[in-house]
Image (cartoon, helix red, strand yellow):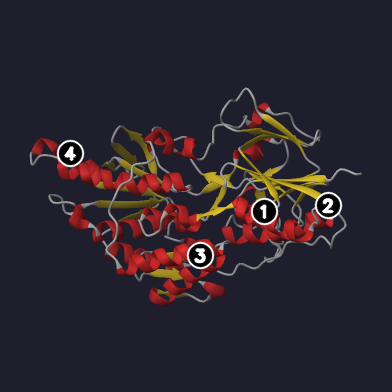
Amino acid sequence: MVDRQRVVIVGGGFAGLYAGKKLEKLLPASTAELVIVSPTDHLTYSPLLPDVTASVLEPRHVAVSLRQSLPRHRLVVGHVTSVDVEAKTITISRGESDADPQVMSYDRLLLAPGSVTRRFPIPGVAESARGVKTITEAAFVRDHLVNQLDAADSLPDDPRFDAERAERMTVVAVGAGYTGTEIVAQTQRWLKRVADRWSKIDVDDVKWLLIDVAPAVLPELGPRLGQYALSAMKARGIDVRLGVSVASVEGNVINLTDDTAVPSRTLIWNAGIVANPLMGTLGLPLERGRLVVDAQMKVTDDVWAVGDAAAVPDLAKEKPADGPQPVTPPTAQHAQRQGTAVGQNIAASFGIGQAKDYVHKDLGLVADLGGLTAVAKPLGVELTGLPAKIVARGYHLFALPSMANRVRVLTDWALHAVLPPQAVALNQTRSEDALISTAQNTEIYPKAEDKPKVG
């Protein structure tokens, strides 16, 4: 009897999940053993994490079970810290003991480890900034904001405490892209709706500062929708400063590049994303940190890569006469469709079907700013207000890869619309566990310069 070949998927995000679904559909159980390695037992539907920080959604409702979604896969919970493409093995760390990693062989390998929050070597940021890329981080930011206002409310009415009160009532957020803009807009509105929680402070006095080095808010949506979002936030009292970033963080003071010093105990960091650090350890060609692949998402004869960690050629865009083919942006929309496409291509390597180039034209983008305020650009049509809100929520319900999660999210939205908003801090996450380096495990990989080159 011939042993089944082993197909290993690294990463349980959109790309990994949808690749696994396609493989279960196309490959008979007798043909291949399917394995997925993921840091968690679930996919995080990250586009709805701003709803978690704004206490609109229950955190577990944006977590899609990998075991239930991929019943034929063997799930290994852990981090892949290295790949040996010559020996065809991966090394898995479970976090329990670095001295005892698991080495697993593969016959086909799909690399889909996703991305991590982009950080820069700015003094004090690593120790102070909080990302919102995981459920842990989103839940912590929500509780942290409530706790800061609780502490400000409990301070004595004495001028000696005015400086501390101002620090606790000031929020600085970096990044005016989708995540940063949605988090600030939604969370600021939520805190105003629960203002009666505090007896001494006025939530209207909370200072919100959103900064970005870019010249516009939500630049991917175009100038008109970006201006609409900017005007909506300014109307709510949010201070938006463009062309500005963080120069350093010193204690409870955030120094900006415009020479402004902002006393604050809350720094939310959403300055973009970069490919998972695993890509830099492979010794293979990279494009801005993303693994270079061909149009069929292939790296070698038995290795594929997709999603945020792969530079997949964007064949839906015209190749410039004086430059290389553009690559697909790192969005959930592309990761989902690349996962399905690469699943078909991996099946083709077993002689089932034909491998195809990946081609997908972006369907559009959405941003929910809380209440009836939203912007959307489905198929190039610019929408604002209630129509954009309907499109945004409809898209998320459609894109959620689990009917059970769709029902739970829809129920949460309905309850939030008719019931008083919740204003409780569960405080289930320690501050040190919600740092970007800890929550996203960015420090567990060998440095790229320590790895030998392949080829």
Mark 1 and mark 2: span between their CA atoms? 15 Å
Mark 2 and mark 3: span between their CA atoms? 33 Å
Instruction: Tell me which label, 3 or 1, sits earlier in the chain.
Output: 1
Residue 406's disc is: 3
Contact between marks 4 and 2 (CB within 8 A): the answer is: no
Mark 4 and mark 2: span between their CA atoms? 68 Å
Disc 4 target residue:
163
Q: Amino acid at mark 3?
A: Arg
Front one among 381 and 48: 48
Disc 2 target residue:
30
Q: Residues within 10 Å of mark 1 (few under 14, many from 20)?
A: few
Instruction: Tell me which label, 2 or 3, sits earlier in the chain.
Output: 2
Contact between marks 2 and 3 (CB within 8 A): the answer is: no
Q: Residues within 10 Å of mark 2 (few under 14, many from 20)?
A: few
Instruction: Tell me which label, 4 or 2, sits earlier in the chain.
Output: 2
Q: Residue furthest front?
A: 1
Residue 101 in percent (x, y) is at: 65, 28
Q: Amino acid at mark 4?
A: Ala
Q: Amino acid at mark 1?
A: Pro
Quadrant of the drawing holding the C terminus: top right
